[in-house]
Image (cartoon, rainbow, N blue to C red):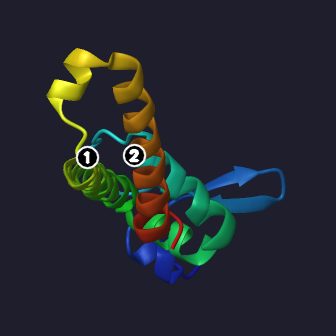
Amino acid sequence: MKKTIFEEMGGTYVRCGDYFIPNLTLPEEEQRFIGVWGQRHKQYLKEYRRGVYLNLLTSGRLNDYLADREEQAQKRFERIVEQMAESEGITEQLKATDQVAWVGEMNNIWSRAREVVNAELIYN
């Protein structure tokens, strides 16, 4: 019996009942940390950019891509928070004198910064 191209390239099959199913494996990929930003982007890709998600998954680049997106989003978030706090005059002095006001202002800034990062890096 003549070998298929798949078999010529070193591929093997498993018999399941009357069918032969190819043994397919994903390429090895270094596992890197994926935090909340990476998980959100992964969910977005699964739901709205299925082709991109499957391409990254089958090529073995999904974890690296999500880890890079995580790092970018975290750095952008921290930079935005720092800039907003500076422009609005939220300082350590305020934190020392009126913690409740500082917490309220910082929660407001964090919320706005999350929205910016989501719009720019996560849900696009």
Are the residues flagged by discs 1 and 2 in contact, CB closer than 8 Å? Answer: yes
Residue of label 2? 109
Residue lying at the far right in this picture: please name it.
18
Location of residue 23 (image quadrant): bottom right
Residue at image point 29% right, 41% down: 31
- Rendered location of residue 1, percent (x, y): 59, 78
Q: Is residue 109 left or right of residue 86?
A: right
Q: Secondary structure at mark 1?
A: helix
What residue do we see at 44% from left, 67% from top? 56
What's the CA distance linking mark 1 and mark 2? 7 Å
Q: Is residue 77 above or below residue 6?
A: above
Q: Residue at x 35, y 57 (%)?
A: 27
Q: Earlier in the sequence, mark 1 or mark 2?
A: 1
Observer able to see residue 105? yes
Structural crowding at the residue carrying mark 1, measured as other residues with C-alpha within 10 Å and reported as few (<14), some (14–19) or many (≥20) = some
Residue of label 1: 85
The residue sitting at the front extreme is 97
State the residue in front, 35 or 5: 35
Say if 37 sits above or below 99 in the image.
below
Q: Amino acid at mark 1?
A: Ala
Judged left or right of residue 74, residue 96 is left
Seen from the viewer's position, the closer of residues 83 and 92 is 92
Which amino acid type is marked by label 2? Ile
Residue 43 location (% of width, % of height): 59, 54
Q: Residue at x 60, y 73 (%)?
A: 49
Instruction: Determine crowd level at label 2: few under 14, some 14-19, many 20+ residues with C-alpha closer than 10 A.
Output: many
* Residue 11 seen in the figure: no
In the figure, is residue 84 to the left or right of 47? Answer: left
From the viewer's perspective, is 8 left or right of 17?
A: left
Residue 55: image x %, image y %?
49, 73
Find residue 10 and report its horizontal and vertical position in percent: 39, 67
